[in-house]
Amino acid sequence: MKFLILGAGPCGLGAAYHLDKLGHTDWQIFERNDHFGGLSASFLDDKGFTWDIGGHVLFSHYDYFDKAVAGVLGDDYYEHQRESWIRILQTWVPYPFQNNIRYLPDDVLRECVSGLRVLSGHPDTTANFREWMDTVFGGGIVKYFMQPYNRKVWGVPLESMSKSWIAERVSVVDLARVERNIAEGCDDLSWGPNSVFKFPKYGGTGAIYDGIAKPLHDKIFLQHEMSNIDLDQKRVTFTNGRTEQYDVLINTSPLDQFVSKCPAIPDQIASAARKLVHNGGLIAGLGFEGRRDDSKCWMYFPENNSPFYRVTNFHNYSPYNVPDGDTGRYFSLMCETTYSSYKPEDTSRIIETTLTGLVDSGMIDEAQRERIASRYLIDIPYSYPVPTLGRDRELAVIQPYLESRSVYSRGRFGAWKYEAGNMDHSFMQGVEVIDRILKGSEERTLNGAAG
């Protein structure tokens, strides 16, 4: 059985890694870029700063993934206690916001608590993500944080989003706990699966996938972009003219793009694929001269005085993310901004508007702005697959059809499931689809039983 894998990101490499472990040798990966890692790649700029494609941290639900990473990194990693904060109303509130509202100004604090005390309705009866927020968090928290922050992240009307993706992604509210935190002056910081995370010492997150790919490189072909998939003949044609036959095709490219490259696809499938929604992201990597004494890992920005929704103190993850590993002389801020048809951004000005936003939100001062040493912009047209109200319905049309044609579409954008789109999820989707095909096993991650 010949496996052909499209994409050398976490999912494609997970599938290849597992095939190799099983001793199955008849497989190949074709990747359109000149590097491994997909959205988990890293880049070294010409000033000596390392940048990820957004704020990745290494935590896992899976022993299998942990062992694969350990085999690559050995002891060359740092382990961090998560310290994440929200910048709002000219102050800092620890994450998760709803558990730490005691940091807010008194009038806003009262508004948030009042909203929690008058909650009505049941989350299960809500029709969309926006209604779910109102029912779970109340008017105050929604007004000051949940609504503006999620609009910045998703770039789509929140009424168009499903609530089904929430799970461990959003901390819900325990009113008694919130009131106790306020009364006792307690912080509530440890929520979530990534309260402790690892980060590679050298090479950014991409070092993980470079390492996984290294022993497999003879079967990985870079700079091969697909142009056509003949589902009847089981043949992929690439833009350079190369063609390859397969018995089983594992696709990790964006599902809507993949379907568009299948010329004989039924109209029903093509129509469903066109209804899938995604956003794009602009990652502004800004390196500065000077020392930054700030223990925060990453920070959220719900307000409209900045274009970005998240900033990472990237020099804190590893000193080797700055030139010569010298955090006494340099620091680096990685700033993420969403764009979409609902939320357009001017790519030509995003670096300058990001710098202005850093000043306006109190992250840097004007003197620091003048000491900028590096500007690096990464534009990712596919950032998040948006869990829209119709997503599951469209996937229920597309995926069974493709699987009936020996095509398995997996990974963040191949499966189009944000809630199963972390690095560990994506890697394990690749592993589990191989086990399903060869052994008939269940795909627990794809079907929502991760861990």
Image (cartoon, helix red, strand yellow):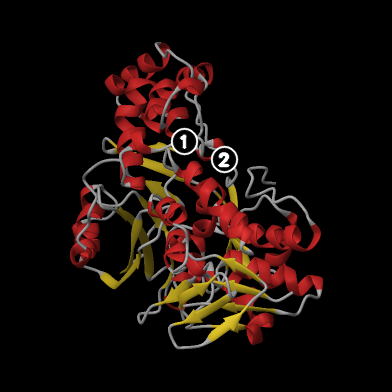
- Number of on-image labels: 2
Dot 2 or dot 1: first in sequence order is 1
Q: Find residue 123 and report its horizontal and vertical position in percent.
A: 48, 22
Q: Secondary structure at mark 1?
A: loop
Q: Amino acid at mark 1?
A: Pro
Query: Is residue 191 at least partly visible in the picture?
Result: no
User: In the rendered view, does 433 fall on the left or right side of 416?
Assistant: right
The image quadrant that residue 336 belongs to is: bottom left
State left or right for residue 96 relative to residue 213: left
Q: Secondary structure at mark 2?
A: loop
Q: Is residue 427 above or below residue 322?
A: above
Q: Say which amino acid is labelled 2.
A: Gly
Residue 39 in the image: state x and y as whole percent. 48, 65
- Residue at numbered disc 2: 192
- Residue nearest the observer in this picture, 397 or 17: 397
Q: Which residue is mark 1?
A: 96
Instruction: Work out whether residue 411 can be spotted.
Output: yes
The Cα–Cα distance between marks 2 and 1, rounded to whole angstroms, is 9 Å
Identify the residue at image location x=44%, y=88%: 240
> Looking at the image, do the residues carrying marks 2 and 1 touch, with CB atoms under 8 Å apart?
yes
Q: Is residue 350 left or right of residue 285?
A: left
